[in-house]
Image (spheres, grey):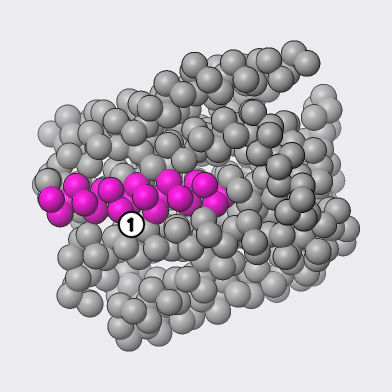
């Protein structure tokens, strides 16, 4: 990637970037809303915590399976119609979720949303970079990640508040309304960006032979698996193990998201000069937070501290590793490499949520942090002893 310069973005660059950031906000809000509403959704359909958690797992596994094939098909479209189509499908899925009258119907509606998700996160960062100019790539990627972090600060807690006050269905309906508004906004401000050269399966070996990209994919699978073994059950964990009331749980989720914004700011400012150090630090931060989760449950202050560490490292991971994918892949490979990254990340989300559900069912919800930490520590070891060395070797070439 070329050297970046300090130059203010023009209005024509900011307007679509704001739309993409808001899109990231609503997509992440939608994906993780069940985390804050598991108890209420389970009560509606009379399902256990583990069964309700499958809404997260199956969604993530669907994204994993669909990311690459849908992105290969979508690579034939220009970015503007592709983005608008994705938002349209996403909006339809939210409406169906709000109208779900059974657990099975809700699961099917979430799969519709997963189709949109699988393409959006494959194109979000590359499109943001193209909209803002490659010289501002870290800022553009940071804006997308900031939208994700805002989902945890505002979206997830607000969704939880709406769910508690009006019911979880209204939460999905609100996301549908917001996504429809973003669709209309982007229809007016999104520039015409020609599609990248269509990707074919014949090019896939080129990505899989890239040792840095493969290393990123391995770390991502383990990292996300460890992360979501704990995070998917953070709400019932804080309620049951921490003995906290609904308001404190909501505030803890807000603290998590605010920390994500801080992490985004830190990475966007300092990452370029310390790339490999950041690659290790963001994985180490999540592993440490998971190790401390059970211990922190004795104190609200400790819980907020762990959530802050977790949030900073989590948002930092998204910025660092997406930027490294753009760094180490050719322009024609970027969107598909991102699709693979998104698919593998969601493999980790789904598997981690499934493991966390198993821990809740067959052991104790109090142990989800330890289970996640064990997996995250494997990710950290691989990052330190394999990925970082590959990054250094390939950068020196």
Instruction: Name the residue: 49% across, 18% down.
Output: 384
Quarter of the image for residue 302 reads top left
- Disc 1 crowd, CA 10 A, few/some/many (<14, 14-19, 20+): many
Is 91 left, or right, of 165 in this rendering? right
Front-most of residues 78 and 341: 341
Is 57 left, or right, of 20 in this rendering? left
Front-most of residues 36 and 61: 61
Instruction: Name the residue: 30% across, 32% down.
Output: 373
Whether residue 374 is situated above or below residue 119 in the rendered picture: above
* Residue 272 visible within the image: yes
* Residue 149 drawn at (x, y percent): 50, 46
Magenta stretch, overall SS: helix
* Residue 350 drawn at (x, y percent): 39, 53
- Residue range in magenta is 342-362
Quarter of the image for residue 43 reads bottom left
In the structure shown, which secondary structural element does the residue marked by tag 1 occupy? helix
From the image, tell me which residue sits under label 1.
35
* Residue 147 visible within the image: no
Front-most of residues 165 and 97: 97
* Residue 336 drawn at (x, y percent): 70, 50
Name the quadrant of the N terminus.
top right
Instruction: Name the residue: 31% across, 44% down.
Output: 229
Quarter of the image for residue 217 reads top right
Instruction: Name the residue: 77% across, 50% down.
Output: 202
């Amino acid at each position: 990637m070329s050297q970046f310069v300090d130059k203010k973005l023009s209005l024509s660059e900011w307007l679509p970037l704001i739309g993409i950031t808001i899109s990231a906000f609503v997509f992440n809000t939608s994906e993780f809303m069940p985390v804050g509403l598991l108890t209420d959704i389970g009560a509606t359909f009379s399902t256990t915590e583990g069964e309700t958690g499958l809404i997260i797992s199956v969604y993530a596994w669907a994204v994993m399976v669909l990311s690459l094939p849908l992105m290969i098909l979508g690579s034939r479209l220009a970015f503007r119609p592709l983005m608008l189509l994705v938002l349209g499908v996403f909006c339809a899925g939210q409406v169906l979720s709000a109208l779900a009258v059974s657990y099975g119907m809700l699961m099917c509606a979430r799969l519709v949303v997963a189709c949109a998700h699988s393409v959006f996160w494959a194109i979000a960062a590359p499109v943001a970079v193209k909209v803002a100019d490659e010289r501002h790539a870290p800022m553009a990627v940071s804006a997308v990640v900031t939208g994700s972090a805002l989902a945890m600060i505002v979206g997830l807690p607000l969704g939880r508040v709406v769910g508690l006050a009006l019911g979880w269905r209204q939460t999905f309906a609100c996301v549908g309304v917001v996504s429809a508004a973003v669709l209309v906004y982007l229809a007016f401000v999104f520039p015409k960006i020609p599609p990248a050269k269509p990707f074919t399966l014949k090019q896939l070996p080129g990505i899989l032979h890239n040792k840095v990209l493969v290393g990123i994919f391995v770390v991502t699978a383990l990292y996300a698996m460890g992360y979501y073994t704990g995070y998917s059950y953070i709400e019932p964990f804080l309620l049951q193990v921490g003995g906290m009331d609904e308001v404190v749980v909501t505030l803890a989720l807000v603290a998590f998201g605010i920390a994500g914004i801080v992490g985004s700011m830190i990475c966007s400012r300092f990452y370029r000069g310390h790339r490999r150090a950041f690659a290790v630090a963001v994985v180490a931060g999540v592993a440490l937070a998971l190790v401390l989760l059970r211990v922190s449950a004795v104190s609200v202050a400790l819980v907020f501290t762990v959530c802050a560490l977790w949030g900073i490292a989590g948002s930092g991971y998204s910025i660092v590793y997406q930027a490294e994918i753009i760094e180490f892949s050719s322009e024609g490979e970027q969107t598909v490499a991102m699709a693979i990254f998104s698919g593998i990340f969601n493999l980790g989300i789904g598997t981690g949520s499934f493991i966390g559900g198993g821990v809740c069912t067959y052991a104790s919800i109090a142990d989800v942090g330890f289970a996640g930490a064990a997996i995250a520590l494997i990710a950290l070891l691989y990052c330190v002893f394999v990925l970082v060395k590959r990054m250094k070797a390939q950068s020196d070439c």
